[in-house]
Image (tube, helix red, strand yellow):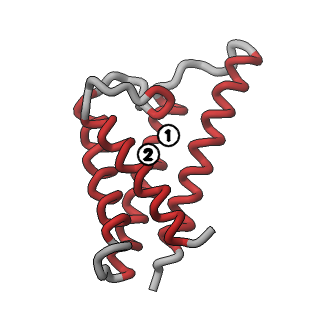
Amino acid sequence: MSVNSLRIIVGVFLLLLGIAGISPKIEESIFSLNNKNLVLESVFGIVEIICSLVILMGLFIKTRKKTVYTAGIVVFWFYVARIVLSEFIWSTPAHSSVSAFISWALLFSAEIIIASTLWILAKAYKS
């Protein structure tokens, strides 16, 4: 898979996640912050939309590598903050049963895979 394919996949994911974050009528399901804080969810959504547009526009418009790198790093750190808030601070206890822990671990693994992909994508554009 090429870096450009990864940019498209991540860009579309972040765009959809951002739209879901700023629209209270769209349920983010497993990717919500879990605290019903619409202002914070909207801030995350706006940052995700802006960064996704920078990442995607770079495929069609001449964009400096540093711009794509900066957008990637910004969204990476916002995504790490999202993981910390949703999986550790505002999450329900996962130690109540084995099935609850497995569900939490599965979601946490998916979140880490997404964060790792954001990191790899950003690093591909570091000058």
Q: Amino acid at mark 1?
A: Val
Marks 2/1 in contact by CB < 8 Å: the verdict is yes
- In x, y percent, where is residue 103? 67, 25
Q: Residue 110's image quarter?
A: top right
Q: Is residue 104 shown left or right of residue 37?
A: right
Name the quadrant of the N terminus. Answer: bottom right
Residue 21 vertical position relative to residue 98 in the rendered view, above or below: below
Residue shown at 55%/50% (left/top)? 114
Q: Give the structural element (helix, strand or loop) at label 2.
A: helix
Residue shown at 25%/32% (left/top)? 23
Residue 27 vertical position relative to residue 10 in the rendered view, above or below: above
Q: Which residue is mark 1?
A: 84
Residue at the farthest left position: 39
Residue at the farthest front position: 60
- In x, y percent, where is residue 48? 33, 50
- Mark 1 neighbour density, 10 Å: few (under 14) some (14–19) many (20 or more): some
Q: Which residue is mark 2?
A: 81
**Distance CA(mark 2)–CA(mark 1):** 5 Å
Q: Give the structural element (helix, strand or loop) at label 1.
A: helix
Residue 120 vertical position relative to residue 115 in the rendered view, above or below: below
Residue at the farthest top position: 96
Q: Nearer the viewer, residue 44 or 14?
A: 14
Residue shown at 56%/67% (left/top)? 120
Q: Residue 106's image quarter?
A: top right
How many numbered tags mark residues here? 2
- In x, y percent, where is residue 30? 50, 29
Residue 43 vertical position relative to residue 97 in the rendered view, above or below: below
Q: Amino acid at mark 2?
A: Ala
- Mark 2 neighbour density, 10 Å: few (under 14) some (14–19) many (20 or more): few
Q: Is residue 87 shown left or right of residue 23?
A: right
